[in-house]
Image (spheres, grey):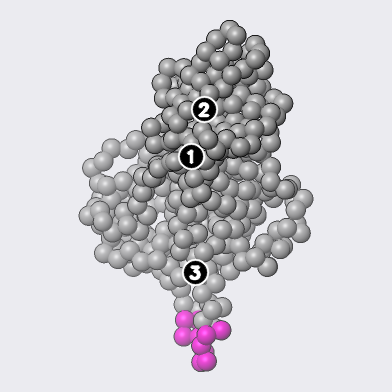
Amino acid sequence: MGLTLRLEIRKTMQSAVLILGGLEGKGFPVDISVNPSSLEIKTPESCEMLSLPPEVKLVPSTCRYVQHNAGEGLHIRLKVQAVCDADVVPALKDILKVQKSVTFQCQPCGEYIIREQQFHRVLPLPSENWNSLVEEWCCHPDPFANRSCLPKVNDCFLGDTFFLVNRANVSDPPRETNEKSSVPHSVDANVSNTKGNTKVICKRCKAILGETVSSDAVKYYITEVLILPSGQDYKLISRTQFVESVIVQLLMELSASKSTYRFCVQGQDGKLVLLLWLLNVDTLLVESGTRAGNVTSLFSDNFPAPSTQSLEARNAARVLYSSCTDGGNNELVDKWLNQTGAHTLTFPSNTCLELLLLLSLNNASLPHSLRFMNNWQVAYLKI
């Protein structure tokens, strides 16, 4: 097995943990030279060089902690000088406002939902508990009682995980199932007071896209719909990549706007799927090679063999997660919902399971010593 490298950098602290693997099959002694832009590994049989990305510079004199973990390799802590700004992905509301005309398509298959639409108003919906806040702040009867926030023609209302459009703006009337949504009323209190919401599915691939909330309004989830400037061709993106990019952007936006880092992810049916804790978004990862057991590195599909070219640095968000599908952490769930003010995110149930699978595969790609933090599992989402 060839050498493997994993360099996890915290940009704000300019510190890093370097893990060198694949040394077990090499002859001894092993001489490792740490240079600012590369690592040189000499053994009696070979000499290999690993070149780092140009935006990452190691500080060799700061190598203070070296430990060998069986099955993983050498763990080295040191200082780095790293600059790697993530590409700023525009928020959904900015895309809709800036573009003169946009097209909505089903993300899995490309089926058109809305063709060449320019919205006159793009407005954010109030938070999910706005009714209770009005009752606390007002000294007179709630003026908004029994009133819903629904879009008129050429309106687009944005929630945290969905957007609402008027049925008149939809190119073809959505196909609806007869199955009624069982999402708790409080979750979507800012949308509609109706209890007869029905699921909206794609006519081509049968994916659940959203639900109708009234006779005139349709809700689409941001994880199911691709929004493109009119005239731009549909580009097939892997489902995993799309879900990951949408979720990580949503977590970053909510943490910045609402100062919340704990999220309860539930399905469209109201069943809680996982707890998600956003730790930091200043992580920079450099990875190469494969690990024992045929478990690939997190970004292995994007990186060439380390012996031929420089590696690439990728921005990532570090998260903790805990699955709720087995019902084994009810005490923790109750604490999050009632004490910590965790923010609830609702997606189609299949999308929640896709996210859980993505996190689980990501966790399995990590060295074993990095997979857990207390009783939580660790994962990284690419930014």
Mark 2 and mark 3 in contact? Answer it, CB < 8 Å: no
* Image location (x, y in percent) of residue 148: 46, 73
Q: Give residue 169's quadrant in the image.
A: bottom left
Q: In this figure, which residue is indicated by the disc labeled 1? A: 80
Query: In the image, what residue occupies the spot 37% across and 41% down?
Result: 111
Ranked by sequence position, the earlier of labels 2 and 1 is 2
Q: Amino acid at mark 2?
A: Val
Q: Secondary structure at mark 3?
A: loop
Q: Amino acid at mark 3?
A: Ser
Residue sitting nearer the eye, 90 or 314: 314
- Describe residue 191's horizontal placement relative to residue 361 as left or right: left
Total count of labels: 3
Q: Quadrant of the N terminus?
A: top right
Q: Secondary structure at mark 1?
A: strand
- Describe residue 180's horizontal placement relative to residue 49 as left or right: right
Give the residues in magenta: 136-145
Q: In this figure, which residue is indicated by the disc labeled 3? A: 127
Ranked by sequence position, the earlier of labels 2 and 3 is 2
Q: Give residue 368's quadrant in the image.
A: top right
